[in-house]
Amino acid sequence: MQLVREFFELRLFHVLTHWQHEGVLPRTADTTSLLFIEHTSPETGRAPGFVLAADEVTRLHRAVVEVRAWHADRFYASVIENSTALSHEPGSETRQLGRAVFGDEFTTVLVLSELPASAAPRDKALQLLRERGIGHVIEFPVLLADMLDRVSAHGNYAPSQSLQTMRILKRYGLVRRQQLEFPFAAPAPRAQDPAEED
C-alpha cells in the first residue's frame, strides 16, 4: 500500500487512505487495500487504456484504487475465478465508498502483481477483470519501474523509507537502466596455466 501511495504521490495525485477516515466513510470487509486518488490537473487527450502504462496514469482524474499485491502469483484467469477478494464487482461497496468521497465522477483501478505473459491467458484474465466492473489495471513492475525512474540518486527522501531505499540503490549503482537489475559480481575468470596453452 505504501509503494502504491507513493507512486501516485510522485505523479502529483492527492491520496486519501480509507483507514484514516473510517468514522466518515462506510465500512467494508477489507478497508486496508483501498486508496482514493485525485489529480487536480489531469492530462487531456486520449483516454487511458484498460491496462495502464505509467505515462497514462496522469490522465485519470479521480479513482478508487484497490491493491492486490500477491507477489507470489501472476493473475491468471484461475486465480481471479477462485479469489474471494476478486469475486465481488466493484459496483457494490467500492462504488459506495467512491461516491462518499468523490460523488459520481470516478473510476476504479486494480493494482496487481503481474498478468500472464502469454497472449491468450493474458486476454482471458483481462476479460474476467473487465466483467467484474474494474475500470483499469496497473501491474507492479510498471509501478516500480516508474518510481525508480523518478527517484533521484542525489535527492533526499528521508520521510519515506521506500523512496530512500530506492535512492540508495541507485546511488550505489545497484539499479541500472531503471530496471530491477542487481549487478552482482561474477566469479573472476580462472587464470590459465601457461603449460595448458601448449
Image (spheres, grey):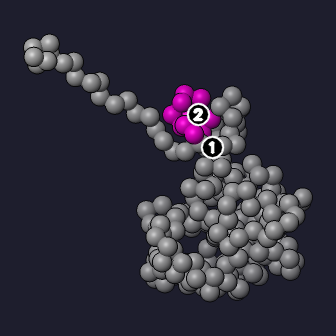
Residue 48 highlighted magenta (yes or no): no
User: In what element is the residue under mark 1?
Assistant: helix
Q: Position of residue 153 (x, y in %)?
A: 65, 31
Stretch of the chain drawn in magenta = 165-177
Choose top left, top right, bottom left or bottom right for residue 64. bottom right
Residue that appears at 59% across and 29% down? 171
Would you name the residue on which mark 2 appears? 170
What amino acid does circle 2 point to?
Lys
The C terminus appears in which quarter of the rendering? top left
Would you name the residue on which mark 1 appears? 148
Residue that appears at 54% across and 28% down? 172
The one of 166 and 176 positioned closer to us in this rendering: 176
Badge 1: few (under 14), some or many (20 or more) residues near its Cα, within 10 Å? many
Q: Position of residue 115 (x, y in %)?
A: 52, 68
- Asked whether disc 2 touches disc 1, contact meaning CB atoms under 8 Å apart, the reply is yes
Badge 2: few (under 14), some or many (20 or more) residues near its Cα, within 10 Å? many
Question: What count of labels does the image hold?
Answer: 2
Residue 22 showing in the rendered view: no
Q: Position of residue 140 (x, y in %)?
A: 57, 58
Q: Is residue 155 above or below residue 40?
A: above
